[in-house]
Amino acid sequence: MIKKIFIVSDSTGTTAKQVVEAAMSQFHGKEVEFVVYNNIKDTEGIHKVVKEAFSANAFIVYTIVLPQLRQLMFTEGRNYGVSTFDLFGPLLVRLTELLETEPLFEPGLYKPFDSAYLRRVEAMEFVVSHDDGLSTEELSMADIVLVGVSRTSKTPLSIYLANQGWRVANIPIVAGINPPEELFTLPRRRVVMLTLQPERLAALRQTRSTHLGTTATSYVSIEAIKRELAYAYELLERRPDWPMLDMTAKSIEEAASDVISLLGLQKND
């Protein structure tokens, strides 16, 4: 029978679960089932958890800030014959002695993942699922849309901006192929067109072709590249409000700063 461990917390229970999982890593081949009870902040919640632990023959590990609730968990565990382990209590007592001050006794103050971190994670997921013309029906959800011909650094710039918390999509411009219509319905200050000097673009494409072992001469020729760029510039006639950013001499960091400035966005913290 797989042993059960009840993780009980007056907050999310994430911290307690991670601590127990770290301890369990020392017991190879032994499986346990974790049951998390979060936001337990009153006596009724303590009574309910202990009764359920008794019925399931479970072990309780808890992180509870309020002393009276920690004491109740200990007492109820004794009454029901349920083993309990207080992760927070002893440490709070020792820190009180060391710091010579009382703790705040406010549940939920510790947040291992703040809003800025979660925003960056969401932005990275967004950029992966909207790279190189993917999911164009969701363009309106993007904070920033980068457009440009091949090898204008759309993807690396998108990833860099996503790491700052911006949801970025990028759309390739290919001569003779109409971009998705959704692109032209986006509001002002949403799209930036990336460009490069033809000679620099040709050099980058040649390196790419060599790396891939291909011999697509139209992809690397100056004449073809100029035609592609001319087609990209024609699109600006439909949306002259799109700013253009020359990437020829730009680092990704500089380009990201320029994109934010060109679109008049407030920097994410």
Image: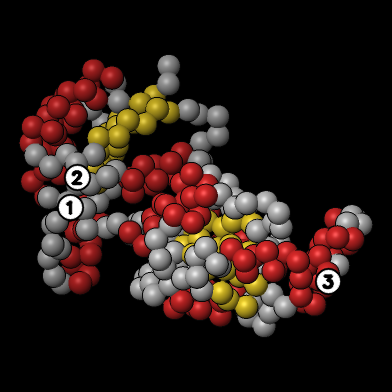
Residue 135: tell me if it is visible. yes
Callouts 1 and 2 close, C-beta under 8 Å: yes
Direction from residue 174 to residue 70 in the image, left or right: left
Q: Which residue is mark 2?
A: 10
Direction from residue 227 to residue 7 in the image, left or right: left
Q: Amino acid at mark 2?
A: Asp
Callout 3: SS:
helix
The residue sitting at 23% across, 42% down in the picture is 9
Q: CA distance from mark 1 to mark 2?
A: 6 Å
Image-quadrant location for residue 113 = bottom left
Residue 267: tell me if it is visible. no
**Crowding at mark 3 (Cα within 10 Å: few <14, some 14-19, many 20+):** some
Q: CA distance from mark 2 to mark 3?
A: 65 Å
The residue sitting at 29% across, 43% down in the picture is 13
Viewer-side residue, 102 vs 231 = 231
Q: Which residue is mark 1?
A: 107
Where 234 sits versus 180, above or below?
below
Image-quadrant location for residue 244 = bottom right
Callout 1: SS:
loop
Viewer-side residue, 213 vs 16 = 213
Callout 2: SS:
loop
Query: Looking at the rendering, in which quadrant would you find the C terminus?
Result: bottom left
Locate residue 83, reporting x and y percent. Answer: 26, 31
Q: Which residue is mark 3?
A: 222
Locate residue 148, reporting x and y percent. Answer: 63, 64
Where 170 sits versus 46, above or below?
below
**Crowding at mark 1 (Cα within 10 Å: few <14, some 14-19, many 20+):** some
Query: Residue pushed farthest front?
Result: 237
Direction from residue 250 to residue 100 in the image, left or right: left
Q: Amino acid at mark 3?
A: Ile
Q: Amino acid at mark 1?
A: Pro
Which comes before the other along the chain, label 1 or label 3? 1
